[in-house]
Amino acid sequence: MKALVLDIGGVLEYTPATGWVARWEERLGLAPGAMEARMADVWEAGAVGRIGEEEVRERVAARLGLDAAGRDAFMAELWAEYLGTPNTELIGFVRGLRGRCRLGILSNSFVGARERESARYGFDTLVEHVSYSHETGLAKPDPRAFAAVCEALGARPRDCLFVDDAPPNIAAAEAAGMSAHLFTENAGTLARIRAHLYTEH
């Protein structure tokens, strides 16, 4: 059976930059780029599940000198940008494909994403399998991430179409034997999905 695998941020969610990092750097009297320098290892560890949510919160508070209220406000702005707003047209289209093909999500994520995205967008009911990097420890463009999601869906790579908004991930999916489509807008993406499901052999 054909399979469709989608990215979340920039595809199923619209996630434009909100400027929250620059606002916090200014608020804390930090130089531009200082936030990334202080927090890079925490963000990396959270993206592949080496630390949990509570430890993230503790490190944010300690490294930025925030009290509990400041820490909570900081994390709220982080999640506001991370979750963005839903691509309702694409989500509705994918929901209509249930039963016609195997459906999956492959996302470079952050610890806590599954609970928040399931509650807000219902991604756990949209597709059959959601592969989050913070749960698997495998982040795109690692070829093992693509192999794992195909295996989870019981589909051969050549029968899978992968949709992502990052060119390096498109190249990696194709190198893994999948078909791939670079998301820029909905119309072309829906046409590409239809072509994959109904005309390709």
Image: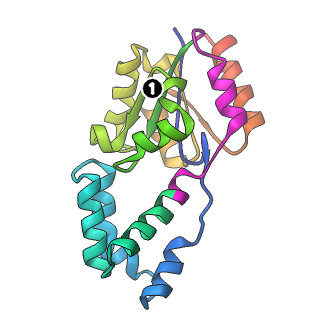
Examine the rendered structure and indicate whether residue 6 appears above or below residue 82: above
- In the rendered structure, the answer to whether residue 96 lies left or right of residue 139 reads right
Q: Quadrant of residue 43?
A: bottom left
User: Is residue 192 found inside the magenta-colored segment of the image?
Assistant: no
Indicate the position of residue 159 as horizontal and vertical percent values: 51, 16
Q: Residue at x 51, y 55 (%)?
A: 82
Q: Which residue is mark 1?
A: 177
Indicate the position of residue 106 as horizontal and vertical percent values: 45, 35
Examine the rendered structure and indicate whether residue 163 appears above or below residue 70: above
- In the rendered structure, the answer to whether residue 29 lies left or right of residue 143 reads right
Front one among 14 and 194: 14
User: Is residue 91 found inside the magenta-colored segment of the image?
Assistant: yes
Q: Quadrant of residue 92?
A: top right
Front one among 64 and 139: 64
Q: Residue at x 37, y 47 (%)?
A: 112
Q: Residue at x 70, y 20 (%)?
A: 194
Indicate the position of residue 93 as horizontal and vertical percent values: 69, 25
Q: Residues within 10 Å of mark 1 (few under 14, many from 20)?
A: some
Q: Residue at x 48, y 31 (%)?
A: 105
**Magenta residues, as a range?**
80-100
